[in-house]
Image (tube, rainbow, N blue to C red):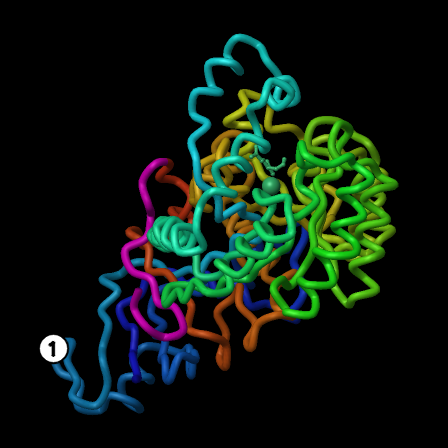
Amino acid sequence: MEYLIFNIGEIATLNSGDISKPLSGVEMYDREKLVLNPGNGILISNGIIKKISEEDELIEEFAPDYSNGKSDILNLVNAHGKAIIPGLVDCHTHLLWTGDRSNEMQMRQKGYSYKQISELGGGISRTVKSTRKASKEELISVGNQRLDQASLNGTTTIEAKSGYGLSVDSEIKLLQASTEINSQKCNLLPTWLGAHDFPSDKTKDEYIDELINLQLPFISDNKLAKWVDVFCEPGWYTLEQTEIIVNAAKELGLKSRLHVDEFVDSNGLTLAAELGSVSADHVGFSNLDSRAKAHASGTMQVFLPGTPYVLGKNLGDGINDCLENNWNFSLATDFNPNCQSISLPFVASLATHRLGIDPLAALVACTRNPASTLNSELKLDVGSIFEGGPADINILNSKFVDYWCQTPGVSPISQTFFSGFTV
Ligand code: NIG
Ligand code: FE
């Protein structure tokens, strides 16, 4: 199947330098290097971007019979002057769970903290109760509905964590469900998060023993997850417990992406850097020294501003600190029962409208940068638009690429291609 997209506005190719590497600081909003002016076309062949070049040249070479926007040789797609951005990459979601915790909002408004709500039987353990009862088929079905929403908002690659099972059988069920979701709309990459909380029917030591001796070996033997994750936070997993679990996973050949410093700075980000984690996520409260260490060790800092937003908290200075200090960072949705937005344009709107981040920098943080933490598990590098790369692209509803994160609550996308097919 060949497509030639023509009549395009700006194209955010984001393909400067070595596309497998993330960008930082001013590189993230260098329009000269990252954005093409109107007048270019994109040729897609068998799911791959075959050529990006001046529209007239492409038409002459590949659609010589062109007349009035039509050709019998290939499919012409008129972008109507609208801008194009890469398929979006969401590197942190809790995609699969069932249940409803919307009544916890009242508790938050009365002043109960996340920890207090969890001690009263709400929070993660409440979602665990409902998720354990769900069949694999139900989980696949809710997963597909959520992927539809992600796709409507331009996502073409998504990471999905387990973590609402907290037992051997139910963690496996969650990971099998993610593996069996056969989405024609995006790449789905599963992460094991058996260490999301502690189940009520075991002591902490018993559960950690189960994680290391039963869950992790099964996950690794059956290739059910690409990475492991631990909720490293005072009140959940300590630094020591996190280290033990991550090291056990390493011995099985599994790398880590960690939840750290979400509510307080416990030096979780420094630990992630020392353990060589692929990414450290939340990092809202991490100190500057940890941030510098993470950058130096190649650990991506992933900010999840949707979470402080729904918890009624300040979005923090971390994103701007990273941008000013040239430290790599990404943005992701953290879609979960508390934070039910699976829209990267919304997350980027928070960064742009509330924190003053340049829309183009926010785009790099939702595409090329998170892709650099996931590409090792994909056949072709996602996150930017380049010849030979996968045809994962979004046509916006505006001629300007900056539009992509300026319609909070409404999708900015008019059409998405995933692997060369229209979604
Ligand atoms: O990343 N903080 C840990 N896990 C999720 C929230 C889990 C939940 O509240 O169900 C997060 O925000
Ligand atoms: Fe999370």
Q: Residue 222 at x, y = what percent?
A: 64, 69
Q: Residue 196 at x, y = what percent?
A: 66, 41
Question: In screen coordinates, is 39 left or right of 17?
Answer: left
Secondary structure of the residue carrying numbered label 1: loop
- Residue 229: tell me if it is visible: yes
Q: Which residue is mark 1?
A: 68
Based on the displayed image, in which of its 4 quarters is residue 184 positioned?
Answer: bottom left
Q: Which residues are magenta?
A: 409-423
- Residue 401: tell me if it is visible: no
Q: Residue 27 at x, y = what percent?
A: 64, 55
Look at the image and say whether residue 411 sits in the magenta stretch.
Answer: yes
Check the picture and name the quadrant holding the N terminus: bottom left
Does 14 appear above or below 388?
above
Check the picture and name the quadrant holding the C terminus: bottom left
Location of ligand 1 given as a quarter of the image: top right
Q: Relative to the observer, which residue lies in front, 253 or 151?
A: 253
